[in-house]
Image (tube, grey):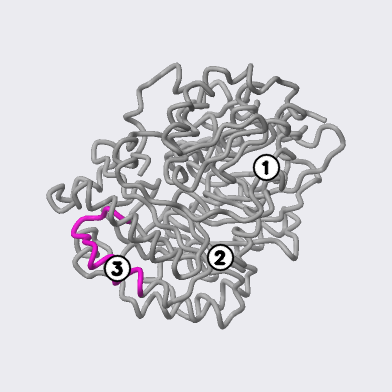
Amino acid sequence: MPRYLREIMLQTVKSAPAVMPAVEIDLDLIRRFDQLGPRYTSYPTADRFVESFDAAAYESWLARRNVGGITRPLALYLHLPFCSTLCFYCACNKIITRDRSKGATYLKYLTEEIALQTSALGGDARVEHMHWGGGTPNFFTLDQVAELSTQLRDHFDLDFNGEYSIEIDPRSADAAYIAGLREHGFNRISLGVQDFDPNVQRAVHRIQSEAQTLEVIAAARQNGFRSVNIDLIYGLPKQSLVSFERTLERVITANPDRIAVYNYAHLPKLFKPQRRIQEADLPAPETRLKLLALAIRWLTSAGYQYIGMDHFAKTDDSLAVAQRQGRLHRNFQGYSTHADCDLIALGVSAIGNIGPTYSQNFRTLEEYYDSLDRNTLPIMRGLELSADDLLRRAVIGALMCHFAVSKESFTASYLIGFDKYFENELNELREYEELGLVELGDDGITVSPRGRLLVRNIAMVFDRYLRQDRERRRYSRVI
């Protein structure tokens, strides 16, 4: 069996505690270790991709992804970049327009990419998971959603029991639209909220009433969606402990299955819309930490399991169950239950993962369209992972998803002596051990409840690229 396939077998129940411990909040430790670092939705991170990995390299791996006679299912990610209005905090690859004809043109090209992908893929196209992100996917009309869904079903074999999710801006979706999404096969939905406080909403140019959000959630429940997720952000301008507590209370009352509480990364040099945010309005560093602590206390007290990083889920949600069973996975959309899937990415700037490779499409519409006009897959860059990359990816994934690493599993799957291979890293972890953040045993590494909020720091110890290059200005703060 190829090494990259053995990797997905690493996360066994033995690697993860039977019951995930509660997270402990030590603000002094967080202050001490708060620094810039990757979010590890991939390893190596996307800034390490190279342009020499082109469409030809991608097609080569796509054609032989099921080496060894093992058929791996697919996951699909579709990037739909258009938004009708600009949110000042946003760092996504998006296009602000009210011209709906641009959406129609984009769908035409997206259909062409779908055809090229499945042609290179051959006959094996079974899909277990799909996610539409953006941008604002509900920028498109239900007729356009139906058109795109038909194209996908014509080219891929979508599993009847699969998970099919979409991101929604509640400001431009009503009950009829949500019912239409369910009719077209979606069974999971994610809502952008960020904060319900009117002052915060004005400061970030996103006015969204609680009633709009609740209408979408109610429609999702009535139409049989399996899961509802709400996204929040802490550290936004005008945010206070009092205002954010009110938002958390309202969100918990809405009873979503999952809640993400993201850290706002203020990087105005990289993201022009953020220049419209007044830095004087941003919460002080001390307040930001207290906002995070507030969210953790409220959500865990309300019965949500802390998954890791910025994610919470009800204990019976599939994400929480996967974590307890050692099946949790992390990819470019965050935490996932589909560790055994190859990820095909469709649309401008989208990032995929086929076998031991990553690939990213062109970031601008002009380049994306030009490539498809030449009947070439729009691959801008990518990476073929080395044996060391695959090993370190698995270690970092185990830490990020399960807060534990089993040395026995890695020894069996990668044929290494774990302590010898990672001698320098284990020595570096001694400081974390002395502070009670990790336990270093003969059988493995365990992140303590006290260390879970700093798991990015712990994972960074195993990042060979960061060890070679300590320049981290491109990353967000870990907390």
Name the N-terminal-most of marks 2 and 3: 2
> Label 2's element?
helix
Callout 3 crowding tier (Cα within 10 Å): few <14, some 14–19, many ≥20: some
165, above or below 464, in the image: below
Name the N-terminal-most of marks 3 and 1: 1
324, above or below 30, in the image: below
What residue is disc 2 on?
145
Query: Alpha carbon of mark 1 to alpha carbon of mark 2: how far?
Result: 41 Å
Instruction: Name the front one of labels 2 and 3.
Output: 3
Observer-nearest residue: 424 or 272? 424
Question: What mark, if any, has residue 38 been given in the picture?
Answer: none
- The answer to whether residue 138 of the structure is visible from this angle is no
Q: Quadrant of residue 373?
A: top right
Q: Quadrant of residue 64?
A: top right
Name the N-terminal-most of marks 1 and 2: 1
Question: What mark, if any, has residue 15 been given in the picture?
Answer: 1
Where is residue 235 shown, x and y percent of the image?
Answer: 27, 53
Observer-nearest residue: 479 or 135? 479
Where is residue 27 shown, x and y percent of the image?
Answer: 31, 47
Magenta-tinted stretch: 234-249
What residue is disc 3 on?
245
